[in-house]
Image: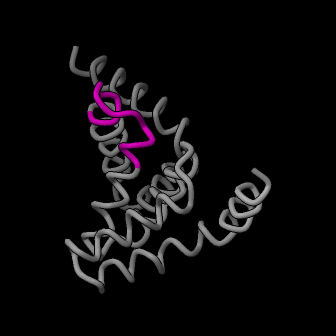
Amino acid sequence: MENKNCEARYKKGMNVLKQINNNAIEDLFNELEDVTAELGKFVVEFPYSEIYTREGLDLKTRELATVAALTSMGNAKSQLQNHINAALNVDNSPSEIIEVIMQMSAYAGFPASIKGIMAAKKYLKKRITSYKTKIKNN
């Protein structure tokens, strides 16, 4: 019974990850496999299966909240970059992500917000240009 429940949670979590950022979990699995593959499995089974699938918030809002939380932590660059990419994948705009990171300066301090913007550059640089072009044409 326990094994079937874990399998169902894993499948449910992977379905969410496929929607938002499939490559990130593959990268995580690759990084952890020589030490502990179970941690990657736990990541899929808990936050993505049990938290991301709750009613009340859509994936777009959940990703903005996650970007805010990881920015506030100030020490999770890799995870922040993955969730910035996921936020973009679920239709958050580059400007929305930048605003959320900037707002964290009031609550987590300027160093955390600056680190967040620096982490965001990797994913936002490409998309900002196309986003600005899209806004100009509308």
Q: Residue at coordinates 69% horizontally, 59% vertically from top-left?
A: 131
Q: Residue at coordinates 67% horizontally, 62% vertically from top-left?
A: 127
Whole-percent x, y for residue 46 in the image: 27, 38
Please say if 93 is above or below 2. below
Q: Quadrant of residue 11?
A: top left
Left or right position of 109 against 57: left
Whole-percent x, y for residue 3 in the image: 28, 21
Return the residue nearer the eye: 1 or 53: 53
Q: Quadrant of residue 60?
A: top left
Return the residue nearer the eye: 7 or 64: 64
Residue stretch rendered in magenta on the structure = 51-63
Q: Residue at coordinates 53% horizontally, 62% vertically from top-left?
A: 95
Q: How is the image coloured?
A: one colour
Please say if 23 is above or below 78. above
Q: Residue at coordinates 48% horizontally, 39% vertically from top-left?
A: 17
Return the residue nearer the eye: 60 or 123: 60
Left or right position of 95 against 34: right
Please say if 112 is above or below 3. below
Is 85 within the magenta? Answer: no
Whole-percent x, y for residue 103 in the image: 32, 68
